[in-house]
Image (cartoon, rainbow, N blue to C red):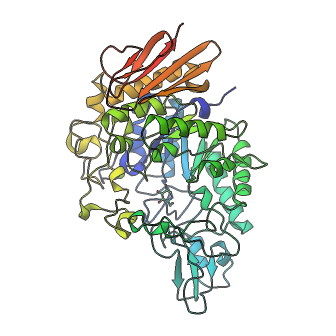
Amino acid sequence: MTTWWQSGTIYQVYPRSFQDSDGDGVGDLKGIAARLDHLVALGVDAVWLSPIFPSPMADFGYDVADYCDVDPRFGTLADFDALLAAAHDRGLKLLLDFVPNHSSDQHPWFVESRSSRTNPKRDWYIWRDARPDGSPPNNWISDFGGSAWQWEEATGQYYYHAFLKEQPDLNWRNPDVRQAMMDVLRFWLDRGVDGFRIDVLWHMIKHADFPDNPANPAYAPAMGEMHRVLQHHSTDQPEVHGIAAEMRGIADGYAGDRVLIGEIYLPVERLMDYYGLGAPGVHLPFNFQLIDAAWDARSLATMIAEYEAALPAGGWPNWVLGNHDRPRIATRVGEAQARVAAVLLLTLRGTPTIYYGDEIGMTDGAIPANRAVDPRELREPGLGLGRDPVRTPMPWNASAHAGFSTAEPWLPMGEDWPTRNVAAQAADAASMLALNRDLLALRRKHAALAVGNFVLIATVGDVLAYERRLGDERIVVALNLGTSEQQVALPTGEVMLSSVVGPASIGTLRANEAIILRVTG
Ligand code: NOJ
Ligand code: MG
C-alpha cells in the first residue's frame, strides 16, 4: 500500500507571487483559491505554501511573529479555512511551511526574552556572553553573511541568529520551546492541514558547547561569506533526530497520512539519517541533488544510483528541480533541456515537487538593482546570491500585469510574460505546460511510473535510460541530455510521450529529446 504523498506530486506556491486578489500587488490566499483549478488541470496532488503567518517580512515570511495566525497581507484565518476547504473539495492536499528554527525578533516570545536576563523566556532563545575582548562567543557566520551573533546592549549579551538578526534562533534544548512548537503543529493539524515542509530542519540544534566552526579550505569570496567556515558545530547535531521523531509522532497521530518534509541541505549519507535513527524521522527529507547536479547523462546516472542505494529500508525517495531559494531549472539548463528535466523529475522513483512557474518554463527574472528586495541580495550584492529573480509573479495571461494583479507587482514580471503565460500555453499542445500536464496524466494512469521499481538501464553517450516496473507493466524512459541525435538500443514498445514535437522513433533520440516507452516485447 502506498500513500498519497508517495504516489502524488507536490506543487510549491510562493504566496506573494501566485495571485493577488485585492490589488496590492502582493499575492494572497484568496488569490491562490482562485487559481486552484490551474493545479487541478496540471494534475498535481498537493500544494505547499511558503509561509503565510504574520511577519514583519524581513525574510518574506520566514521570520514568523505569530505561528498560529495569517498575515493580513495574505488574508485571515477564515480565508485560510476557505482555501483549505476549496483545496480538499478538489482532491488537493494542502501543506504549510513550518519555521521552527527561528522566529521573528518581533515575536512576543523574543520581545520578552530580550527584555531582561531574568525574564522566564530568556532561555527560549540562545544568549551568550561576549568573549573577554568583547567579540562574539564564536566564529559562526550567518547564512546571509556577517557574524551570526548580535550584540544586545540592554542586557549585555549576544544572541544567535543563523539567518538575519531579525530571525533569532529558538533554543530547542529548552523543553518549553519544544512543547510550544509542538502545539503549533497540533493547531494546524487540528484545522485540517495535510502536513508541513519544515524549514532548515538540520539547523535546529547546535553543539551544546558552541565551539568555533572549522575554516573552509575551499572558500572563495564569490561563494558568499557563510562559506568561510564549515557548519560542523552549528548544524546537523545528533539531537536533532529526537526532535524530528517527536514531530513525526504528532503527525502520525492524526488520521489521513499527514506528511512531514524536511528542508535539509546535506550530503546524501547525512541526509539519509533524517528518515530516522532508531525512531522514524520525517517522511521525506528533501533531496536537492537535482538542483546542484552537473547536467550530463553520466553525472546524473551516478547521482541517481547513489541516492537510490543510500536510501534506508522503507525510505521513500523524492526529487526537486527548484525552489524559492535557488536558480530556476530553465535558467540553469536552458529551455530545451528544461523539458527533458520535467520528464526526469516526473518519471524518477519518488515524490516530485514542482516549483510554481516551472510548469511553464519560467526563467530567472532580471531584477534592476533598485527593485531588489531580498535581504540575501541586499546584504551581499552582486554575487548572484539574491533570490528575487526566482520569485517573480506567475504570468497567467497577456492582460495588464499578466493577470497576476491589478497593480504593479511587488517584484517585476519576468520579461517574457506576454508570451510565456498560462493562457497562451494552455492553448498550445507543444507548450511546456502541455508537456507537464501530459506527464502528470501518465503518472496517474500508469502506477509503474508513480510507484514502480527503478532500474538504471544504461548511459550511452548523452543518453540516460532507466526502467520503471510494477507487476507486468514495464516503462522505459530515455533522455537525451545532449544537443545532437543519439542512437540507443531500447526494448520494443510503444512511445507514449516525447518531449520533442513530431514523430518519435525508439532507436534514435533527437537532440534534447526525452521519450517514455511502454515496453511490449
Ligand atoms: C530556508 C528558506 O527556504 C529560505 O527562504 C529562508 O530564507 C531560510 N530558510 C531562513 O528561514
Ligand atoms: Mg494581495
Image quarter (top left, top right, bottom left or bottom right) of the C terminus: top right
216 vs 97: above or below: below
Residue 297 in view? yes
Question: Is 344 left or right of 314, judged from the image as shown?
Answer: left
Task: Mark yes or no: residue 317 visible.
Answer: no
> In the rendering, at what x and y percent does residue 65 appear?
52, 65
Farthest front residue in view: 461
Q: Quadrant of the N terminus?
A: top right
Camera-nearest residue between 284 and 401: 284
Q: Furthest-top residue in view? A: 521
| Identity of the residue drawn at 52% across and 79% down | 150
Q: Position of residue 365 (x, y in %)?
A: 29, 50
Report the residue that reaches farthest toward the right: 278
The residue that appears at 65% across and 37% down in the rendered structure is: 309
Is 35 in front, or is 10? 10
Q: Position of residue 95 (x, y in %)?
A: 55, 44
Q: Is residue 293 left or right of residue 286?
A: left
Residue 79 in the image, given as x and y percentages of width and height: 47, 46
Q: Is residue 199 above or below residue 361?
A: below
